Image (cartoon, helix red, strand yellow):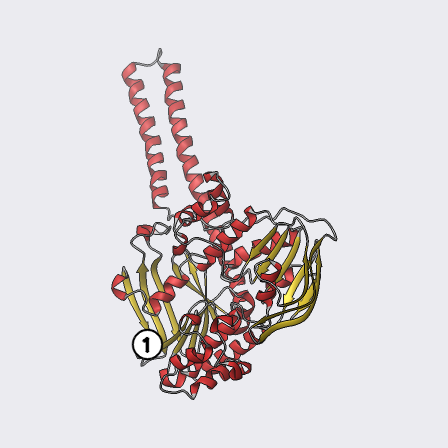
Amino acid sequence: MAVGVCFKNMFVIDVKNLSFGYESSNASTLKDGLIFDSLDLSLKKGEIAGLVGPNGSGKSTLINILIGEIKKNSLKSGTVKVGAFSYLPQEAEVDHLANNLECFLELKFKDEPWRVDLALDIAGLNELIDFKSGLKVSSLSGGQNTRLALGVILARADYDQPEVLILDEPTNNLDVEGLIWLKESLLKFRSQGGAVLIASHDRSFLDDSVDKIFAIEEGRLAEYGGGYSSYREQLKIKNNFKLKRYESYMEVRKSLEVNIDENRRYADKVTGESYDRIKHSMPKGAFNGKKRRAQAGLGRKIGATHSKLEQLEEVKRPNKDPEIDVRFEAQIPKAKLIFKIESGGKSFGSKSVFKNLDLEVRGPSRVLIAGKNGAGKSTLLNILAGRDTLSGGDSQAGEDINIGYFSQDVYGLDDHKSAVEELSLSEKKLSRCYTLCIKIGLDKESADKKIGDLSRGQKAKLGFVKLMLSQPEVLILDEPTNHLDVSTKEAIEEALVKFKGCLIVASHDKYFVDKLKISKAVKL
């Protein structure tokens, strides 16, 4: 639904001096428990901007403020103006609205049923038109779900008349075709005078699609021109400048402090030695007067240096990205049988997902499961992980193999427990649980929060911690980089490159896949 204020100027989002923090939050490192402190954001008509920041930095919170989920009267300070918008949440859960696709679409277009097929057409899901009356929405893949949700938004555009699209991780689960479709859809919307704000960690898509980057940095928003690669280069230069400025400040400060310390020691030394040397030859009163003059002179020098030190403008040490430490240390014998499928097929009712599949995996292979959205990649991974079975064909699994499974957006976590409580089920030593959280980029405050209060990226990190604890010989990963910030993605990439076990992965993240040294690709 499109809501917001009507803009008479070129800005569709205009945020000034925004300060906000949750009353119950103890996770913020900013003063007074703030998540944002004097944050500014301006987006013009015809602009496509990316919104980036580490997991837990407040991207989803900022979006919730923009769309009105967090009310203006709860803000500490600032003004928020947003034009008419359409919003795409992370992982739109459309299956909650209806049992089948046709019912879902009819609910979205109650008075305009002709838009039902239009939405599917815009979404590039024409193959579903003939099946919509009987197709369960829950049977759609993650990528199909995303395309459907955005297709609905665009099909309603002439009715809702949004000035800006606000999209939260829209590329999760999208195949190459879907990414091209998304980019073209956004460019078309911009050509019609619209603007787009995209919260995303998708490096490749941000490079290809946005005009500028908004980065959340220490509770404020910094703006960078260009795509993601340009942003990283500019950030590197900026951080190097900050570091040099800090080092220069510390050098001056240390010099002043050394000067003060040396003068103090000199004062003590001079007055003490002078007294010992001349106390028998000089009248006591005369000596005490000389001593006081010497002390006064040195005191003035020390005082002047103190004054310089106090007037020195403080420069804070630049924050470093947390050091992410991910390790999968198990290994598997060469040529050991992991899985074997002959003429395998899988169907849901009358709908065939895949058929006549032949697949043999032996350790330590590195296998990519590829295919379009809806081709059955997640279904196959579920079967390989032992969570589903084939509808036809023969299958064989290796014996005595420890399999670690990271499913798409489902991490097997209890939202009512804290991260540390969840980990303590596998690792009884509490200090070790905290250490594991820190290694994956969860600070102590986040580790103590209820899992249900964590961001999706933080939950994904916790899922990887649980995976590490299980020490798997075989890793089955389904879109593992969804929701993760870049530093965590890079750490996981490095860990998987070093992993000596068997790796089976489905991912549309080109940056990620290119790093993995895939030995076999299976296209569904």
The residue shown at (42%, 63%) is 222
Image position of 98 (left or right of 347): left
Q: Give the x, y percent position of residue 181.
A: 54, 78
Q: Give the x, y percent position of residue 98.
A: 41, 74
Amino acid on which the number 1 mark rests in the picture: Val
Residue in the foreground of this view, choosing between 60 and 379: 379
Which quarter of the figure is the C terminus placed in?
Answer: bottom right
Q: Residues within 10 Å of mark 1 (few under 14, many from 20)?
A: some
Please, which residue is most extreme toward the left here? 73
Please, which residue is most extreme toward the bottom here? 114
The relative height of residue 153 versus residue 416 in the rendered view (above or below) is below
Tag 1 residue: 3
The relative height of residue 472 versus residue 91 in the rendered view (above or below) is above
Answer yes or no: is residue 502 visible. yes
Which quarter of the figure is the N terminus placed in?
Answer: bottom left
Please, which residue is most extreme toward the top here? 280
The residue shown at (46%, 53%) is 413
Image position of 344 (left or right of 285): right
The relative height of residue 112 versus residue 348 in the rendered view (above or below) is below
Please tell me in which quadrant of the rendered image residue 199 appears.
Answer: bottom left
